[in-house]
Image (cartoon, rainbow, N blue to C red):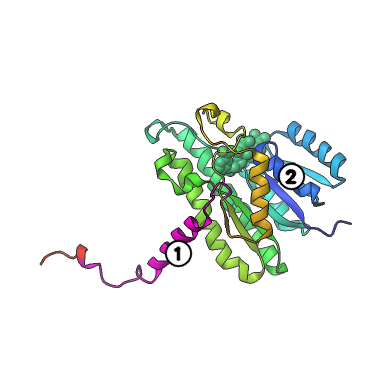
């Protein structure tokens, strides 16, 4: 019997999720892999069982479909072996805001925000009552940068960062570790799927390097891990500056500059 916690990984059929699966398998964790493409999950699972001797369960699901999402939520709620959730499945978009249609906005927001939040909510009470476990949410540096011109995608990732910071504050006193991972451009299929030519991007990180760096942050129990950020103090300064606002933003009176002259 495996005494390490089982890891449930969403978006495990390719890219960052599939590398997380490989790395946790190498560490000896059993896995539950979630994505839509069952054939790809089966191929990955067979390889990982063979290479690492771990148990790999498949949970094919389209997380934008309510019934599928409910199935994964139930697994997270009920399977006490699952101690780590890697909330990774996500999609991007191409084009500016005026080019977005309801059909493109809907799955983006549903997958990147709604599914991620509901999966975290499904597992958190059980982990909190056990007094241990981890939730890893994959955000993006785009969530820090409206200037990058991916407004809806970036907004979903800003949400992931905020949610992770809030959950960390709520859950770490209960023994549950919450990490936000913010990759920059990483060589995966996400770009092609969004209709963006990866060759137009500069400074693209290898997916193995990204996940290995994220796992260094995981092992250190960092709340926010930004693998491409070389000068760590830049994040510390930004966060300290934000925290500096906290004592100022709760006021009964409007600021002087907003009071009318009369
Ligand atoms: P990817 O290779 O396209 O992987 C996305 C994964 O999500 C796939 O396994 C895909 O599998 C799954 N997925 C997509 N739609 C789904 C749905 N409706 N239901 C269930 N699973 C679904 O992209 P990636 O780069 O590894 O992306 C992983 C995460 O990293 C995303 O949250 C992304 O926003 C974030 N990220 C990526 C980059 C980058 O440059 N690559 C940068 C910053 C952040 P199926 O198609 O089989 O469902």
> What is the quadrant of the N terminus in the image?
bottom right
**In x, y percent, where is residue 13?**
70, 37
Tell me if residue 35 is in the magenta stretch. Answer: no
Q: Relative to residue 63, is residue 166 depicted above or below?
A: below
Q: What is the residue that sits farthest to the left in this orientation?
A: 262
Is 251 displayed left or right of 8 in the figure? left
Q: Which mark is residue 240?
A: 1
Q: Relative to residue 96, is residue 262 depicted above or below?
A: below
Is 34 displayed left or right of 247 in the figure? right
First along the sequence among labels 1 and 2: 2
Q: At 65% from the left edge and 49% from the top edge, which residue is drawn?
A: 213
Tell me if residue 254 is in the magenta stretch. Answer: yes
**In x, y percent, where is residue 26?**
80, 47
Q: Which region is colored magenta?
A: 227-256
Q: How many marks?
A: 2
The quadrant holding residue 252 is: bottom left
Quadrant location, ligand no. 1: top right
> What is the quadrant of the C terminus in the image?
bottom left
Where is mark 2, residue-wise? 21
Q: At 45% from the left edge and 35% from the top edge, which residue is drawn?
A: 102
How far separated are the C-alphas under marks 1 and 2?
34 Å
Q: Nearer the viewer, residue 253 or 136?
A: 136
**In x, y percent, where is residue 61?**
68, 40
């Amino acid at each position: 019997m495996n005494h390490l916690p089982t890891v449930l990984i969403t978006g495990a059929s390719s890219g960052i999720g599939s590398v997380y699966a490989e790395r946790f398998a190498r560490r000896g964790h059993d896995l539950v892999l979630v994505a839509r493409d069952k054939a790809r999950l089966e191929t990955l699972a067979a390889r990982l069982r063979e290479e690492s001797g771990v148990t790999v369960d498949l949970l094919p699901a389209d997380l934008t479909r309510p019934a599928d999402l409910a199935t994964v939520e139930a697994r997270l709620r009920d399977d006490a072996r699952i101690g780590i959730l890697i909330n990774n499945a996500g999609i991007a978009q191409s084009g500016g805001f005026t080019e977005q249609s309801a059909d493109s906005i809907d799955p983006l927001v549903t997958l990147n925000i709604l599914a991620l939040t509901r999966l975290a909510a499904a597992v958190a009470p059980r982990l909190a009552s056990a007094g241990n476990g981890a939730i890893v949410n994959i955000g993006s540096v785009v969530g820090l940068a409206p200037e990058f011109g991916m407004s809806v995608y970036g907004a979903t990732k800003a949400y992931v960062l905020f949610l992770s910071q809030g959950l960390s504050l709520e859950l770490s006193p209960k023994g549950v570790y919450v990490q936000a991972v913010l990759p920059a451009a990483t060589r995966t299929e996400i770009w092609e799927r969004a209709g963006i030519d990866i060759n137009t991007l500069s400074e693209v990180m290898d997916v193995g390097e990204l996940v290995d760096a994220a796992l260094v942050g995981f092992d250190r129990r960092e709340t926010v891990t930004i693998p491409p950020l070389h000068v760590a103090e830049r994040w510390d300064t930004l966060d300290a500056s934000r925290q500096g606002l906290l004592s100022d933003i709760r006021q009964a009176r409007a600021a002087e500059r907003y009071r009318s002259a009369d």
